[in-house]
């Protein structure tokens, strides 16, 4: 073997070079993908696209979407819009498609934004739902009735398998449609964790709120059947004093309700839910988060409440990423990281999902919490108690992809690629989960990036008990 090895290096080096050139570029960090997406402008779908078609019938409900309605998953918020008149805010529902015996009464709201007046936006919470049960529901009572269905999550518990899809910065371009179609073709995911930046209406002249309506009709094919858990991004702020609009988040707050009060939050921009074996905390990148602020005080009280024997998987959602090696939005999340990262390490958060940067990136488990102004310790270091940070801001919006990366790739960055796509986080049991990222150019069974997660809390506990 020794004589063969001495004669082989030149052949092995050539073979390895051929493989690596076709697959990845390596640097000080992990992997920068060598996949080259065709360079073309991202274009929004036109207003007369079939994707945005208004459902037929007088005052037909449109833009139907659902989200979890309380802390533990036994309630659902059902929302929709009627255009001609308010109509009924009642929801009929039940477990028999042909016999909707239960009902709940909601409320409707409207808003004006510059020269736009919204339709009648209805929100109704249906409660006392049974776990792991298929429900049918109807809206538009008294006019054009439309029926949909959803499945409630299994009861909260430590070994309950559950699968989440992850989408961020979606918009309403042709690429957005590919992303949503690609996600829909994946049979596993049961609930979408949405990472902010919904319609991108603020990118149009006068923050054209018609684009909020078209976006709602575009995503209805998923949001009417699967709950989407909402995170607010910068494109939801809609602060436009030049138009006389000085109330931030006005369209978003009217259209997308979340169950923030059930987790003792004072604002819909930060809240938490339990779903199956996961405890999900949603944070607000664009609301005050410094010490003594409502968000700070809420998170300080919330993290100790998480019972890892009941919900072992602790997931955090936010919009602006803390670890980002692209030259887009670089370090925008830095001040929030400084405030909260020590807590994430202390409470062993498993994974943090963010959007904002229109590309994909996954970190190693790292932390940067040792700095105290005078000690000079200000670089990320490997830390098994720290989360993995994943940016999935690649939904397909009209602003296009982020392609300019910092070089060399930082040591904290495990994998990055400038492509549109979505991700899936599949919890297997108390200790293991399988994560995959899917670029739009591949079949749904193909993972462009993947990682097995060993739950950081239970890994530590199991190692301690084995000693």
Image: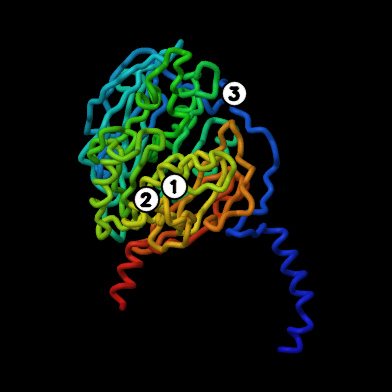
Camera sees residue 438 = yes
Q: Is residue 34 above or below residue 262?
A: below
The residue pinned by badge 3 equals 46
Given this view, does label 2 or label 3 mark the residue nearer the observer?
A: 2
Q: Position of residue 195 (x, y in %)?
A: 44, 40
Along the viewing direction, whichever of 180 and 16 lies nearer the viewer: 16
The residue pinned by badge 2 equals 315
Q: Position of residue 173 (x, y in %)?
A: 58, 31
User: What residue lies at 54% left-to-right and 30% top-to-bottom?
Assistant: 172
In what element is the residue under mark 2? strand
Given this view, does label 1 or label 3 mark the residue nearer the observer?
A: 1
Mark pair 1, 3: CA separation: 31 Å
Q: Please identify the quadrant where the N terminus is shown.
A: bottom right
Q: Position of residue 35 (x, y in %)?
A: 66, 51
Q: Which mark is residue 399?
A: none
Left or right: 208 in relation to 103: right
Label whose residue precedes the other's in the sequence (1 or 2)? 2
Camera sees residue 61 = no
Q: Are marks 1 and 2 in contact (CB under 8 Å)?
A: yes
Q: Is residue 137 above or below residue 391?
A: above
Label whose residue precedes the other's in the sequence (1 or 3)? 3
- Crowding at dot 3, Cα within 10 Å, few <14 / some 14-19 / many 20+, comes out as few
Left or right: 352 in relation to 20: left
Location of residue 41 (image quadrant): top right
Q: Which mark is residue 353?
A: 1
Mark pair 2, 3: CA separation: 36 Å
- Crowding at dot 1, Cα within 10 Å, few <14 / some 14-19 / many 20+, comes out as many
Along the viewing direction, whichever of 24 and 47 lies nearer the viewer: 24
Q: Position of residue 122 (x, y in %)?
A: 32, 23
User: What residue lies at 39% left-to-right and 34% top-to-bottom?
Assistant: 224
């Amino acid at each position: 073997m020794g004589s063969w090895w001495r004669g082989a290096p030149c052949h092995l080096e050539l073979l390895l070079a051929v493989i690596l050139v076709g697959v990845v570029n390596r640097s000080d960090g992990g992997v920068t993908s060598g996949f080259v997406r065709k360079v073309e402008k991202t274009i929004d779908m036109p207003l007369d696209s079939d994707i945005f078609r208004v459902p037929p019938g007088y005052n037909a409900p449109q833009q139907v979407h659902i989200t979890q309605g309380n802390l533990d998953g036994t309630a659902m918020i059902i929302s929709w819009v009627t255009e001609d008149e308010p109509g009924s805010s009642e929801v009929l529902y039940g477990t028999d498609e042909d016999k909707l015996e239960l009902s709940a009464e909601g409320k409707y709201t409207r808003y004006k934004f510059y020269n736009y007046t919204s339709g009648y936006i209805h929100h109704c919470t249906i409660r006392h739902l049974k776990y792991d049960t298929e429900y049918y529901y109807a809206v538009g009572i008294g006019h054009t009735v439309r029926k949909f269905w959803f499945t409630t999550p299994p009861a909260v518990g430590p070994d309950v398998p559950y699968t989440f899809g992850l989408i961020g910065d979606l918009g309403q371009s042709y690429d957005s449609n590919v992303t949503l179609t690609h996600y829909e073709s994946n049979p596993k995911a049961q609930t979408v964790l949405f990472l902010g930046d919904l319609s991108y209406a603020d990118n149009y002249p006068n923050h054209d709120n018609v684009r909020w309506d078209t976006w709602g009709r575009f995503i209805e094919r998923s949001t009417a059947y699967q709950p989407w858990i909402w995170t607010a991004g910068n494109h939801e702020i809609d602060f436009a004093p030049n138009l006389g609009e000085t109330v931030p988040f006005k369209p978003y707050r009217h259209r997308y309700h979340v169950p923030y009060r059930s987790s003792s939050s004072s604002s819909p921009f930060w809240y938490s839910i339990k779903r199956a074996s996961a405890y999900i905390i949603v944070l607000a990148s664009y609301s005050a988060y410094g010490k003594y602020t409502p968000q700070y005080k809420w998170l300080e009280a919330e993290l100790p409440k998480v019972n890892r024997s009941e919900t072992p998987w602790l997931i955090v959602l936010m919009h602006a990423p803390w670890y980002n090696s692209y030259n887009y939005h670089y370090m925008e999340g830095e001040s929030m990281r400084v405030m909260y990262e020590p807590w994430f390490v202390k409470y062993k958060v498993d994974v943090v999902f963010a959007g904002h940067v229109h590309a994909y990136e996954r970190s190693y488990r790292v932390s940067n919490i040792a700095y105290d102004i005078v000690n000079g310790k200000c670089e990320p270091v490997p830390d098994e108690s720290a989360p993995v940070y994943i940016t999935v801001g690649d939904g397909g919006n009209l602003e296009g992809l982020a392609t300019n990366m910092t070089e060399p790739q930082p040591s904290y960055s495990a994998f990055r690629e400038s492509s549109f796509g979505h991700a899936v986080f599949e919890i297997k049991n108390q200790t293991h989960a399988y994560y995959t990222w899917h670029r739009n150019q591949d079949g749904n069974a193909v993972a462009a990036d993947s990682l097995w997660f060993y739950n950081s809390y239970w890994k530590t506990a199991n190692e301690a008990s084995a000693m």
